[in-house]
Image (spheres, rainbow, N blue to C red):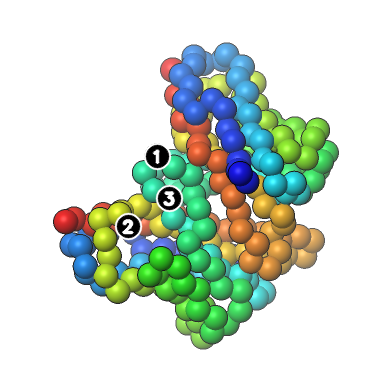
């Protein structure tokens, strides 16, 4: 089954404790991205990757890191989480952004930073 | 720059009512337009899309027509059901100087009452 998987689905942590949210897709997609969703703010892009070893900042990259060492995986790293990073996070992938190509989303990771 | 504006929610309707969710956009090029839907507790999924002016996207009884003259892509459904309760996102994909850009609206929460 074609899908984007994220782990964990739920995470409660404390300020300053490094964490990684994993994202994996099995569709051989080149483009992957991370979003956060907050009430009243819609989806905001954190980072994106056009291909292996190619990543770039989105609209809200501060406090986050990513890597793309393999095509299928795109982990999101919070080196020192803070309460303002409490949010719902989505990973997405697609063949590309060109000409109406569909984005496929993971189920989301709800992160709470105390 | 490019942008997407959606009507604010929540939109509350009774079952079998007619639905319109407004979406307007600004774009420098010739964007592709999308509606994504997020059911409670899930990730986003593509509902419909249109890639050029006057195209009509349709799926699950929902329709939207790409209107270049009014820069709009309004979502409509003739008779809504309780199961349509979800958050709906309008989005566009447009080519920039060096790449493609994906822009999201803030989302509109739809509540259907039996």
Per the rendering, the mark at residue B38 is 3
A108 left or right, relative to B77? right
Relative to residue B8, is residue A7 drawn left or right? right
Where is residue B82, by image quadrant?
bottom left
Query: Which residue occupies 57% across, 58% down?
Result: B103
Name the residue rendered at 16%, 56% in the picture: B114
Along the viewing direction, whichever of A52 and A5 lies nearer the viewer? A5
Find out whether the residues at labels 1 and 2 contact each other: C-beta distance under 8 Å. no
State the residue in front, B6 or A101: A101
Ranked by sequence position, the earlier of labels 1 and 2 is: 1
Q: Few, some or many C-alpha atoms within 10 Å of disc 2 (few <14, some 14-19, many ≥20)? A: some
Q: Chain of mark 2?
A: B
Q: Quadrant of residue A102?
A: bottom right
Disc 1 crowd, CA 10 A, few/some/many (<14, 14-19, 20+)? few
Which residue is at 79% across, 61% downward? Answer: B98
Residue corresponding to mark 2: B84
User: Under tag 1, what secondary structure?
Assistant: loop
The residue that label 1 is drawn on is B41
Residue A29 drawn at (x, y percent): 73, 48
Residue B91 locus on image (x, y percent): 53, 61
Identify the mark at residue B110; answer none if there is no mark. none
> SS for tag 2?
helix
Q: Please say if B70 is above or below A67.
A: below
Question: From what the image shows, is residue B85 above or below residue A10?
Answer: below
């Amino acid at each position: 089954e074609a899908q984007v998987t994220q782990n964990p689905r739920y995470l409660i942590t404390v300020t300053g404790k490094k964490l990684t949210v994993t994202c994996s897709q099995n569709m051989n997609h080149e483009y992957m991205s991370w979003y956060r969703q907050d009430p009243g703010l819609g989806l905001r892009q954190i980072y994106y990757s056009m291909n292996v070893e190619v990543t770039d900042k989105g609209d809200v990259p501060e406090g986050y890191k990513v890597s793309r060492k393999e095509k299928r995986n795109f982990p999101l790293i919070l080196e020192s989480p803070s309460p303002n990073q409490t949010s719902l996070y989505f990973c997405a992938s697609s063949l590309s952004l060109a000409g109406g190509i569909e984005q496929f989303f993971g189920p989301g990771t709800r992160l709470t930073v105390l | 720059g490019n942008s997407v504006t959606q009507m604010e929610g929540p939109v509350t309707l009774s079952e079998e009512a007619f639905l319109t969710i407004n979406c307007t956009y600004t774009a420098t090029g010739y964007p592709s337009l999308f509606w994504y839907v997020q059911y409670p507790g899930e990730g986003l999924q593509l509902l419909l899309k249109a890639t050029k002016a006057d195209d009509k996207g349709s799926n699950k009884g929902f329709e939207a027509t790409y209107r270049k003259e009014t820069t709009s892509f309004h979502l409509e459904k003739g008779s809504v059901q309780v199961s349509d309760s979800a958050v709906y996102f309008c989005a566009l994909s447009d080519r920039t100087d060096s790449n493609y850009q994906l822009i999201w609206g803030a989302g509109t929460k739809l509540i259907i009452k039996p």
